[in-house]
Structure formats: structure tokens, C-alpha cells
Image: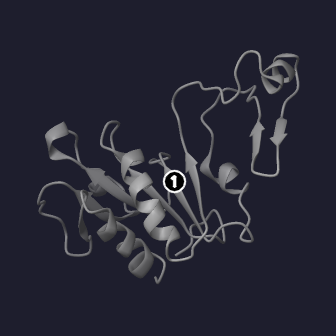
Amino acid sequence: MTSNFSTIPVLGFAAASGTGKTTLITQVLPLIKASGLRVGLVKHSHHNFDIDHAGKDSFRLREAGASPVVLVSKYRRAIIEEFYHQTEPELASQLALFSPEQVDLILVEGFRSEAFAKIELHRPSLGQALLYPNDKHIIALASDSALDTPPHLPLLDLNQPAEIAAFILHTFLKS
């Protein structure tokens, strides 16, 4: 299943902060990769962050005014780019950075208000409202408790990463 953004299938994980999105993704990723898929990821942060640090050449070059700064080795590449118009990033512009020659699937953490396929993660103990009643793009719900969900919305066990990986591989990607 592809989104309106990309020819590469895109699947998000949407939930309130503290639900365990990153933890679940780190458990699901190796299971998906074991099937031979190349998986990219976009993570939205509401906080300012740096991937280079004071004293490093890339930090000094960025502080001197270079943007973007591309840091590259035979192992990996990082692009550090300043956003001068401090508006929330759009998912489409982030997905444009990926190539079908590099990845077979893009997982997204965050961007929950954008229109693309998502699995909602829900822990009733956190007291947060469910997202799916107001988001028609949620294709499954993963919870640590039994929930009364509509028949069209699969309910997955949030504590069973293999079950969620199987849903992604056998249901989402086969759609």
C-alpha cells in the first residue's frame, strides 16, 4: 500500500507521547528486515536537536554558516540542514529524501495529523483518547488491553512485536 506521498510504501506509528512508539519500532524493525526488506525511517521530533556537537568539525562548519552540511564516510552519510523558517516540517518533503533503489518500506514515527496509513498504539492506562475515531487513515490498533474496536480495524497486541511485524508484512504490504 503506498501513500499519496511516495511510490515507496509508507506506514506510520501514531500515539500519545510515552506510549512506546520508539521501543516498539526498534523491536519490529529487525523482524521486518529479516524478511529481506530495506527499511527507512522518518522520526518527527517536537524538540530542537543536534547530531553534531561543539568541538566537532561539522559543528564548527555549521556554526560558521554552512547549511546544509553533509558528513560522509564509507559507512554512512548525515545531512545537517538548518530550517530558517521555523514551521513544522511536512512529511512529503521528508519522504522525498528516500529512493526506491534504497528502501522498500518507510516507517514513520510522528506526523500523526497527516493523511497516510498508520497503526495506532494505545495504552488505556495512560488515559489518552483513541485516535482512530477521528483518523480514517488508521489501519490497525495495537494495544496492551482488550478494546472494543470496529470489525474493519484489526486489534494487535502491543506487547507482541512479531504479531505487528507479521501484520505489516502480510497485510499492509500485500494490500
- Residue that carries the numbered disc 1 in the rendered image: 108
User: Would residue 1 be found to the left or right of residue 18 on screen?
Assistant: right
Which residue is the extreme one toward the front? 74
Measured from the top left, where is residue 55 in percent x and y? 76, 16
What colour scheme governs how the chains and residues are painted in the rendered image of this protein? one colour
Q: Looking at the image, which residue is at 73% across and 30% down?
A: 83
- Location of residue 144 by image quarter: bottom left
Measured from the top left, where is residue 172 in percent x and y? 43, 75
Answer yes or no: is residue 82 visible. Answer: yes
43 and 61: which one is in front?
61
User: Would residue 98 be found to the left or right of residue 9 on screen?
Assistant: right
Vertically, is 151 above or below 160?
below
Measured from the top left, where is residue 67 in percent x and y? 84, 30
Q: Looking at the image, which residue is at 58% across and 50% down?
A: 42
- Location of residue 153 by image quarter: bottom left
Q: Looking at the image, which residue is at 60% across and 35% down?
A: 88
Amino acid beneath label 1: Val
Measured from the top left, where is residue 16 in percent x and y? 33, 40
Vertically, is 161 above or below 37?
above
User: Would residue 59 be found to the left or right of residue 22 on screen?
Assistant: right
146 and 77: which one is in front?
77
Q: Looking at the image, which residue is at 54% across and 41% down?
A: 44
Answer yes or no: is residue 127 visible. Answer: no
| Count of numbered circles in the view | 1
- Location of residue 61 by image quarter: top right
54 and 164: which one is in front?
54
Q: Which element type, helix, strand or loop, lies under badge 1?
A: strand
Structural crowding at the residue carrying mark 1, measured as other residues with C-alpha within 10 Å and reported as few (<14), some (14–19) or many (≥20)? many
